[in-house]
Image (cartoon, rainbow, N blue to C red):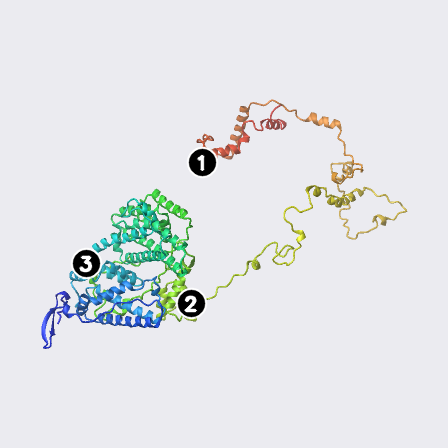
Amino acid sequence: MACAMIPLDEQQVTEATGPLGKERTLPALHPDRKEERCFVPYMPPPEDSSPAQVEEYLEHGKFITEDLDWLLALPHDKFWCQVMFDESLQKCLDSYLRHAPRGLDPSSLPSSPAVADMQRCVHRAVFMTFLRMATHKESKESFITPTVFGEIIYDNFLFDIPKILDLCVLFGKGNSQLLHKMIENIFIQQPSYYGDLDEAVPSVLQVLDTILAKCGLQCEGTTAIEPLKLSSHGRPTAMTMSQQDLVDLVLYLCDTCTTIQAFLDIFPAACSTFQCHSFLNRLASFYEVAVPDIEKAVRKRNFDDNSLQEDLWRRVCHARRRMVEMAHLLLQHTCLQPILEGSENIQTFVEELLQHFTTFLPEKRFLSDYDEQFPIADDISLLQQAFPLLDETRTSYLLQGVEDAWDSVGRRRTQSRPQQTHSSAGLTGQGAEGGAGAWGGAGAGAWGGEMGIREPGEGGETPRGAGAMLDTPHKGDNGAACTISAGELESLLTHIRDLLPDLGEGFLLACLHQYNYSSELVINYILEDRLHPDLDKLDRAMPRPVKEELPPVLSTRSNVFDDDEFDVFNRDQVDMTRVWKGRRKGESVRDLLNDKQHIAEQKERYLTYETVVDEVIVTPSESGAVYNLDDYDDEYDDTYDVNQVGANDLDGDANLLNRRPFTIPQVLRQGGRPQMQEENVEEGEEEDEKDSAVKRDQFVQDPALLRERAEARRATMQHRKGYRPEPARERDVVGKPKGQGQSTETLLDRRKKEAHKSRGANHNRRAMSDRKRNKGMIPS
């Protein structure tokens, strides 16, 4: 029997062996205590839904699930004996990490509900196994000495850096906190993993160099900087390599970026190790050089299958987003986080962050994509609040560099949208000594329900290329408007329908809109039957609403020429004789000017004015009715008959009766008609007017004297109004030599000189002198 309160690595166990039941004492962790059980390796879900392959997968998955459930139900000592000495168990776990479908793989969305359920069961069992393997203390009685635990997991290769990376990318969605505690405990109990991680970072950089070499590219900072050979020009590029090589290259890039980003997001302590190898600068250079070349190849090459091209483009966009998020994680945890926490050497971290931003300035494409996801202006604003002594000139230079990057890539800045915060950024990382409450108790029951395990794919892999999609607005976590692409929306619907095929797309769209397009929340609330009351009222089989077609433009247009004689959209026939192009045939300017028809029409109108007479003499023999004199107007108003209109005027009666005779316009006069004589002006009066006019003096007074008088009058007027003249300054209208640019003051002086040049020199001087003399201002 095991002794209480003694670490498992120090316990001794007495067991009966042999046919005679002879007892012997063995260490608690001994190979002979291992149960003979064969764990089968994992096989991925079938891509096609043939009944034979589905049945084989279900049977295979059932074996794995039953074996892992049996393993998790073992006591603490038996569990660790099986884990340490059973090679088939390690092969089974390794096969799942290697072959389990990732978020973007087609096999991650099983077409059969039975396959999906089996995949979830296997996924959960594997994660629970790794979770129990990562803790050394399950209860007060069941624990291993921390140093011995570190040696066990390190010497037996239970965990290594590739396994940890795969754990992050497979189980990170929805389980980030548990996974963070798990990985943190591994690195705390065995610091040798930090050394392994330091040796693994160059391998990641080598991956980037390999991708560049496959594309025939090279960027600054690579490990193999050497002159290109003459034969290197014949190497295949992204446009010339075979289609299968391009597919493999894109898959390689997407998988690498997704894995590294998931690891840095879940375990931020690794960011400093990556930065020791200048990973951020290498990543930005790789992004600037490789991404445009690969994007161009995916867009412009001809593929045998359009779906393959769409899948490659989706993966390239996903890789771009993950690389930008990697850069943000590195900056956040190595620079921003210490600044916001108020570290002692805050100036050092501020300088490091600004230096990184300055390094990004030549990488125009990377800088614009980074600024779209994580605005640099927001980070600089945080720096200004945390460090008031920040150099404003340097920050202005950085912001201007960001604007230049947007202009250089030929894109317009979109409206900023709220960014998602990383859940692992603020974790304090509880130690493994937290007991059963932190890591669960012993036995299968304690490893089950309250862990909050999320199933694979519930994270909703939604790749989004920076600026490469059509966005649809929706509300973010804080209620502000953010965006989701049409491709992302279709991916979310497909993912949910694969898990819940009985639900209609219309109902799922309403659920996604209600829960901010989070597929995890939608699936969780549907399975737990905790949907919003408004959603419960909807039909769960409701199809997607059909988009209403917009009415034709011609039927909704509104124009001032509607329904006129030339409206061809509403008239079937139009008088084409009134429509011509250019000058109308048969007409000329001379014919148009010689057409006097309008003059003849007006002539009769003006001739009627010649019949006006002052007096009409009626003879006694003629009746007044001939001249309409006997008509009595009952409406006549005799109010003013007694008033002597014009009696008190200064003008005499003779002047009132001297009317100017009516004159026919010259155009309407006929050649033979005698013209009316105008009133002649007496010669004496003309001579008197000439004599009365002031004779023009050709002498011009002294300009200096005139300027002094004008200045004196102006000063007096300004003094009365309380005007204070501006300080005089010398006007500079000459400026710098041509071709060197002119200052603003020079341009203003030239403009003032042009506007007021008529007030000086000899402009209008003689005319103004005569005007003043005529008004009596200057003595003659």
Relative to 746, does residue 160 appear above or below in the rendering?
below
Residue type at mark 1: give it. Answer: Thr
Query: Percent from the top left, x then y, of residue 679?
Result: 76, 33
Left or right: 632 in relation to 320: right
Left or right: 88 in relation to 403: left
Separation (CA) of disc 1 from disc 3 = 69 Å
Residue 328 seen in the current view: yes
Name the one closer to the observer, 5 or 386. 5
Separation (CA) of disc 2 from disc 3 = 49 Å
Q: Earlier in the sequence, mark 1 or mark 3?
A: 3
Left or right: 19 in relation to 284: left
Callouts 2 and 3 close, C-beta under 8 Å: no
Q: Which residue is mark 3?
A: 190
Query: Percent from the top left, x then y, of residue 598?
Result: 73, 45
Q: Which residue is mark 1?
A: 744
Q: Earlier in the sequence, mark 2 or mark 3?
A: 3
Specify few, some or many for label 3: CA neighbours under 10 Å numbering under 14, 14-19, or 20 or more.
some
Query: Which quadrant would residue 322 be assigned to in this image?
Result: bottom left
Residue type at mark 3: give it. Answer: Gln
Which image quadrant: the N terminus?
A: bottom left
Q: Which residue is mark 2?
A: 505
Residue type at mark 2: give it. Answer: Glu
